[in-house]
Image: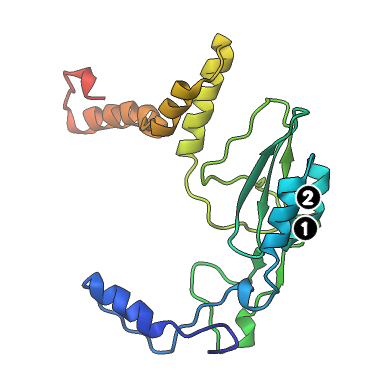
């Protein structure tokens, strides 16, 4: 055990061996988590959340969620909808590399406080979409990592907007279709443009447009 959590070098090495990959690390590797440095108060938060009648009753206590970090969504009986990321979110002075636990230069600068967390409550468009996409605005003070591309969120918005235009409600079957939808809206947008570039540069014509 270290000041940054338990050593996991041997465990990681076993994982790499199972993947038939080499694992060479000059220094021991440990697993740092806020769970080791804070009292576990998740259950307190879940109790408050499950007895709340409005967001005002649980938002003051979101900092009781220690780990894991995840997106919390809610919808109240009075029509309020909302989103907020919860969990101890660390602010670091390095990116795209492992923490150097042997030097204080890589210590956690701070954990984002409850009042500083971004949130979205009852937007005018009437819905909230999260699908591992970036939710905080680009001028938000801190870098919230863990988000991926925006394609899935874009596709979900497409399907929702289509229902809004057609003035149709979502039923169980429609919701299941959305969950199982595999259409790549980015490919739909980019592929025709890429094919034109291909045809122009290689003097080759795609005869069957059904290819895309």
Image location of residue 6, percent across then percent down = 51, 84
To which quarter of the image does residue 206 belong? top left
Residue depicted at x 32% and y 26%: 192
How many numbered circles are shown? 2
Q: Could you tell me which secondary element the residue under label 1 belongs to?
A: helix
Q: Is residue 21 visible?
A: no
Q: Residues within 10 Å of mark 2 (few under 14, many from 20)?
A: some
Does residue 149 sit above or below 9 in this rendering? above
Residue depicted at x 67% and y 78%: 37
Q: Could you tell me which secondary element the residue under label 2 belongs to?
A: helix
Left or right for 6, reference 121: left
Left or right for 94, reference 62: left
Q: In the rendered image, which residue does mark 1 sit on?
A: 114
Asked if the residue at tag 2 contacts the one at tag 1, i.e. Cβ–Cβ closer than 8 Å, the answer is yes
Give the color scheme: rainbow, by chain, secondary structure or one colour.
rainbow
Question: Which one is in front, 83 or 23?
Answer: 83
Q: CA distance from mark 1 to mark 2?
A: 8 Å
Does residue 18 sit above or below 89 in this rendering? below
Image location of residue 16, percent across then percent down = 29, 74
Quadrant housing the C terminus:
top left
Question: Which one is in front, 202 or 174?
Answer: 174
Residue depicted at x 78% and y 56%: 61
Q: Residues within 10 Å of mark 1 (few under 14, many from 20)?
A: some
Image location of residue 124, percent across then percent down = 73, 26
Tell us which disc is closer to us: 1 or 2. 2
Q: In the rendered image, which residue does mark 2 sit on?
A: 59
């Amino acid at each position: 055990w270290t000041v940054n959590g338990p050593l996991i070098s041997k465990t990681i090495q076993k994982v790499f061996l199972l993947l038939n990959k080499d694992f060479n690390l000059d220094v021991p590797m440990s697993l740092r988590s806020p769970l080791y440095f804070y009292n576990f108060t998740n259950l307190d938060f879940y109790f408050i959340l499950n007895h709340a009648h409005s967001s005002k009753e649980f938002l003051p206590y979101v900092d009781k969620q220690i780990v894991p970090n995840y997106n919390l969504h809610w919808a109240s009986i009075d029509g309020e909808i909302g989103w907020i990321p919860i969990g101890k979110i660390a602010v670091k002075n390095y990116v795209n590399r492992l923490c150097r636990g042997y030097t204080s230069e890589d210590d956690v600068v701070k954990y984002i406080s409850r009042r500083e967390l971004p949130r979205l409550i009852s937007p005018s468009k009437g819905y909230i979409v999260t699908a591992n996409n970036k939710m905080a605005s680009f001028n938000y003070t801190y870098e919230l990592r863990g988000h991926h591309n925006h394609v899935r969120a874009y596709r979900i918005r497409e399907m929702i907007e289509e229902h809004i235009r057609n003035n149709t409600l979502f039923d169980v079957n429609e919701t299941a279709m959305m969950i199982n939808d595999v259409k790549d809206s980015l490919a739909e947008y980019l592929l025709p443009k890429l094919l034109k570039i291909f045809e122009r540069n290689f003097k080759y014509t795609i005869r069957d447009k059904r290819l895309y």
